Image: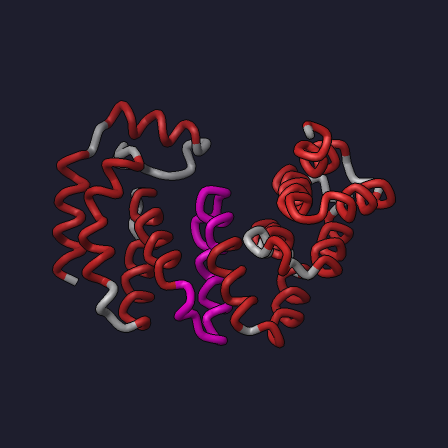
Amino acid sequence: MDITVQVESLMEKQAHAPTAEQMAAYMKNQFDFYGIKRPLLLSIYKPFLNELQSYSWEDKKRCIDWCWEKPQREWQYLALDILIRNRNQLTLKDIDWLEWLIRTQPWWDTVDTIGSYGVGTWASLYPKAVGKFLKKWTESDHMWLQRCTIIYQLKYKENTDVQVLFTQCDCFKSSKEFFLRKAIGWALRAYADVNAKAVVNYVKKARLQPLSEKEALRKVISK
């Protein structure tokens, strides 16, 4: 797409090496960066996001794929903004594509957005297919897929399937993985906003690890 060439030219002009180094260090030096902070980055590609709205969903996905394979992390942030804006266009088969995005260059900064916006929206659009995806990802050996099974309902609030939430927490409550223990606490804390009593009762019985319990009850205790 010609417009991606324009965006790339603007990003390269705004690249800032010292900031790029700081950003890379924050992400454990797993990714390269141009060094463009969020406000400026959004101003660079917002016109592109607006123009892209007239494209087909398949063209938007191709653009996301193109961004996803670029070395600089800012491209993945553009891809996520495209996904967020167009998430209601996800098809039933797109769960496999979302899995590919999660498996490719995974870290919390991309996975959590895909999980809560992408997978979360997909699950609300195709509720009859949720069980199959949950089983597959729960039984996988991929920690980031597993994390998504815990956090995909973050935006659901009162529409949360509480049984699924508690079941997924139970599946991973003994895990030594920091990001799974943190996800349990985060997901429970989000649901506590609408049903603190249910979360408190669950935590009392579940024997969660300290990090998960602390995160789950943080807002409840502070009230």
State whether residue 211 appears in this view. no
Q: Residue at coordinates 27% horizontally, 32% vertically from top-left?
A: 35
Note whether 38 is above or below 120 in the view shown.
above
State whether residue 28 appears in this view. yes
Region rendered in magenta: 87-114
Q: Nearer the viewer, residue 35 or 207?
A: 207
Q: Residue at coordinates 28% horizontally, 59% vertically from top-left?
A: 66
Based on the displayed image, in which of its 4 quarters is residue 30 positioned?
A: top left
Image spot of residue 198 (x, y percent): 78, 48
Q: Residue at coordinates 76% horizontally, 32% vertically from top-left?
A: 210
Query: Quick one: quadrant of the C terminus?
Result: top right
Dominant SS of magenta comes to: helix
Classify residue 17 as left or right of residue 29: left
**Residue farthest right in this picture:** 205
Q: Residue at coordinates 29% horizontally, 50% vertically from top-left?
A: 70
Image spot of residue 90 (x, y percent): 43, 70
